[in-house]
Amino acid sequence: MNQTAEKSAHIIVVSNEKGGTGKSTICMHLAIKLLQEGFSVATIDLDGRQGTLTKYIENRKHFRLSRGIYLPTPEHFCYVPESNPMLYESSQKNLDQCIRNCRQKFDAIIIDTPGTKNYLFDAAHKYADTLITPISDSMIDLSVMADIDYTNDKVKGPGPYAEFIWDIKKYLASQGKPYLNWIVVGNKFSNFNSRNKNQVFAYLDKLSKLYGFRFLPGLKDRVIYKELFLEGLTVLDMSHEKLKLKMSMSHLAAKREIKNLAEFICPDE
C-alpha cells in the first residue's frame, strides 16, 4: 500500500455470507495497524442495525476522552440498511458518494459488511481492491465456500458465497479491474490441533487453488478480543506508554497474528 501525494484509497472489504465470524474485530485491528504505520484510514459499517464496528469505535472514543490520551482512531461512517426496497437506490448512491469522497482523502477504506446478504452487502463487494473473508474451523462455515462430499473427499462445486464472488470478479473485470486480492482468513479457530480443524484447513488449501483466493490461518479465538472491545482497544494498543497494560503471551501472539495479516494483504511491499 503506497502513500502518494494524490490519494486513491485502497479499499478493503471484510465479508462473509454468515454472521459471527469476527469481521468487526478484523476491521478494527487492521484499521489501527494501518494508522500506527502512518496511513490515513476510514472505516464504514454497513451493518448499522447491529453496529458492532460502530460501537467498537464509539467505545474507543469514549475511552480516549475519559483517559485524556491520544489513540489513533479511524474516520468512521455508518449505514443502516433500508427496509423499503424503493429506498435502496438512494441509499446506495449515498454510500457511493461517501466512498468517492473517502477515496480522495484517505490511504485506506475498510468496509465491514452485514452477516446476511442485502443490497449494501452486494454493493460493497463491487468497490473491493482486497476482499478478506474470515472463516472458523467449522464445516458449517466451510459450506458457504463449497459443496463438499465428505464421504468421498470430493468438492462437488462452489458454495453460495464462492459463487457470489465469482460473479463479483466478472463484474470487476467488466469494469477494467481484472484482479481481486481475495484472502480467506482462518478466524476464531480453536487453539487445539483438532482433526476437524486440520480437515477444514486442508479443504481451504484445496479450494484456494480452485476459486482463486489466498489462505491464511489467521487469528485464534482469544478472550482478550472480547475484553478489549469494551474499552475500544486492540492488542496493538497494549504497549501504549500511558496505558501501562501488562502484555501476556496471549497478547503478544495476537499482536503477531494481526501483523501477519496486514503483511499478507500486501506481500510484495
Image (cartoon, rainbow, N blue to C red):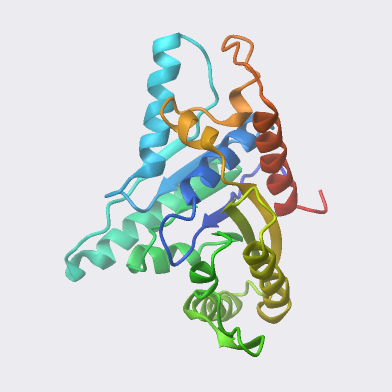
Going by the image, does 264 lie left or right of 220? right
Going by the image, does 120 lie left or right of 172? left
> Splitting the image into 4 quarters, where does residue 35 fall?
top right
Going by the image, does 173 lie left or right of 259? left
Task: Give the percent coordinates (x, y) of residue 250.
Answer: 66, 32
Task: Give the percent coordinates (x, y) of residue 172.
Answer: 57, 74
Residue at the (54%, 75%) spot, across then down: 165
Residue at the (37%, 39%) spot, across then down: 54
Task: Give the percent coordinates (x, y) of residue 248.
Answer: 66, 24
Camera-nearest residue between 100 and 1: 1
Q: Is residue 90 above or below residue 101?
A: below
Q: How many marks?
A: 0
> Splitting the image into 4 quarters, where does residue 243 fall?
top right
Camera-nearest residue between 44 and 236: 236
Camera-nearest residue between 64 and 141: 141
Q: Quick check: can you spot residue 1?
A: no
Residue at the (49%, 78%) spot, across then down: 164
Q: Is residue 196 above or below residue 190?
A: below
Q: Is residue 167 above or below residue 28?
A: below
Furthest residue toward right: 268
Residue at the (20%, 70%) spot, across then down: 85
Q: Quick check: can you spot residue 44?
A: yes
Q: Is residue 169 above or below residue 141?
A: below
Task: Give the percent coordinates (x, y) of residue 132.
Answer: 59, 58
